[in-house]
Amino acid sequence: MIERFYMKENLSFKSVELEFKKGLILFTGPSGAGKSVLMNSILGTIGQKDSTSKLSEVIFNRSINLDDFGIESDDITVFKQIKKEKIRYFINSQTVPKKVVSKIGKLFINHLNPRDITEFDSENLLEILDMMILSKDSEYKNLFQIYQIEFQEFENLNRAIQRLQLEIDDMAQKEEFIKFEIAKINSIKPKVGEYDELQLVKKQLSKKDRIENYIQEVQDVFDKQRTLVEIFDLMGLEDESNKIDDCFEDIKSQIEDIEDRLSELDEVNIEEILNRVEQISELRTKYISIEKAIEHRDSKIEELDRLAKLRAEREELLENIFKVEKQLIIYSTQISSKRGRYLELFEKNLNEYLILLNLEESQLDIQKGKFSKIGTDLAYLKIAKTDIEKLSYGEQNRVRLAILTLKTKFNSNENGTLFLDEIDANLSGDESMRVAKVLKELSKVYQVFAISHQPQLTSQADQHFLVTKESGESFVKLLSSEKSRAEEIVRMVGGETSNQDVHRFAMSLLNN
């Protein structure tokens, strides 16, 4: 619970220091005195509202496990907010972003206001119904846990399928183009080094006639071979004679090779060569080189293989999710069946509080929806066959109180601090007293903070703080005596302190 609150320089407040006890804590006072400013400052320090305080501090009298948030826990937990150029938040002297402060605050702060309808959400209503079933049926917990394990697997498979589908869709958009690129390169069937070979053939073809003419022209030289060799032999230069003979033979052999190659060129189709050069040149222009073109083709083939594997993986996941879904249908049907058997008991328990709050009886309608962490059920609450949204704010507040009180009845772990906005606004005296009795019941579990507009709720307070305003400055003081509390109640009903009838009415409320 909140043990202490300190606030400095907030609108009309200069300085406030308050100590709180467990139970029902009420703020009263004239309109415009600063009651809402005070409560909003407490909530703002815990990240539940926007704070306007220059400095505020809220101390909880217990240690809160903050390890998951990277904050050291202590015997007490201190929230602090400082406003200079900007607002900064601290928990146990560590700087913390407001989002984190708000998230931590929601772990043990329950803030109800007329515009908040989360108490009527299907999930919250089913949670209370499940608490009731768990208090009566020991097997229900095991069934619910098995369902949640299967549902988690269902969610994991769904996420995996979604990730795969995104990748498949992305690749599938390019699939036809990839196939076209592969087919285009494969149709050409390029080979490494082929371009240089083609260029050489092309060059040789362009010079074939000239080479053949030159060969004819040098034939006379070979006819003189024997004469040259004889000259060197006659001179007794046998070594030189042999060298010259070998040189001629070597040249003749090379020319014969050239003639063979020229002969082969006779069978070459020049148009085919030129077309082939053009095809290979296109690949070189697009991919820089034949090697790069082949690498590109191979990488695209790998992409198609990857796409095929992803599709196969997706089909396998779909088979698995189908099996899990069959199990979920079985377990969710069992959960729905048990909930159906306890609907009447839920309505009976809720109606006890609704009647106490001067409201008509409720009807909880359960319909089928999609798989969720709590089953396939969707709960819709009506009061006297009227949708919650169509009720007045005052009626919604009282329904909200009834639901919250019912929740605490079946959940012994439900505790913390409850803040209520305009909880008894526009209520009759009888309705206000009924709200007071329910809040008194809630205050056995919660530490309840409320601003009271009615003497009935004020009379039930465990701590009663009066907020006043003098010369533009707001003050807060604890009304600890019965006399001071009675005087405030007299003021609230618009009576005079000297009026004995009004005073007796105030005392009767306090002694009720």
Image (tube, rainbow, N blue to C red):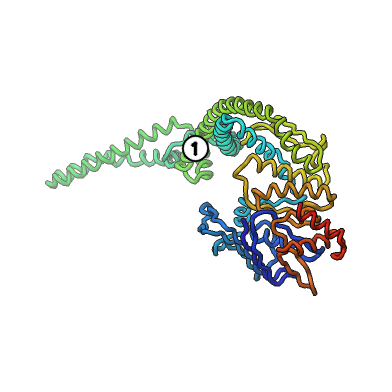
Q: Position of residue 220 (x, y in %)?
A: 31, 40
Q: Position of residue 182 (x, y in %)?
A: 52, 34
- Judged from the image, the secondary structure of the residue bearing numbered disc 1 is helix
Q: Please name the residue shown 76% across and 54% down the image.
A: 511
> Mark 1 highlights which residue?
297
Observer-nearest residue: 269 or 124? 124
**In this rendering, position of residue 254 left or right of residue 324:** left
Q: Can residue 267 be seen in this view?
A: yes
Observer-nearest residue: 84 or 72? 72
Q: Please name the residue shown 78% across and 46% down the image.
A: 434
The amino acid type, in three-letter code, at marker 1 is: Arg
Q: Position of residue 39 (x, y in %)?
A: 71, 60
**In this rendering, position of residue 508 left or right of residue 346:** right
The answer to whether residue 83 is above or below residue 420 is below
Observer-nearest residue: 217 or 37? 37
Q: Where is residue 102 in the image (x, y as percent from the top left)?
A: 63, 55
- Indicate the quadrant containing the N terminus: top left, top right, bottom left or bottom right: bottom right
The residue lying furthest to the left in this view is 236
Packing grade of label 1 (10 A; few <14, some 14-19, many >=20) is: many
Snapshot quadrant of residue 336: top right
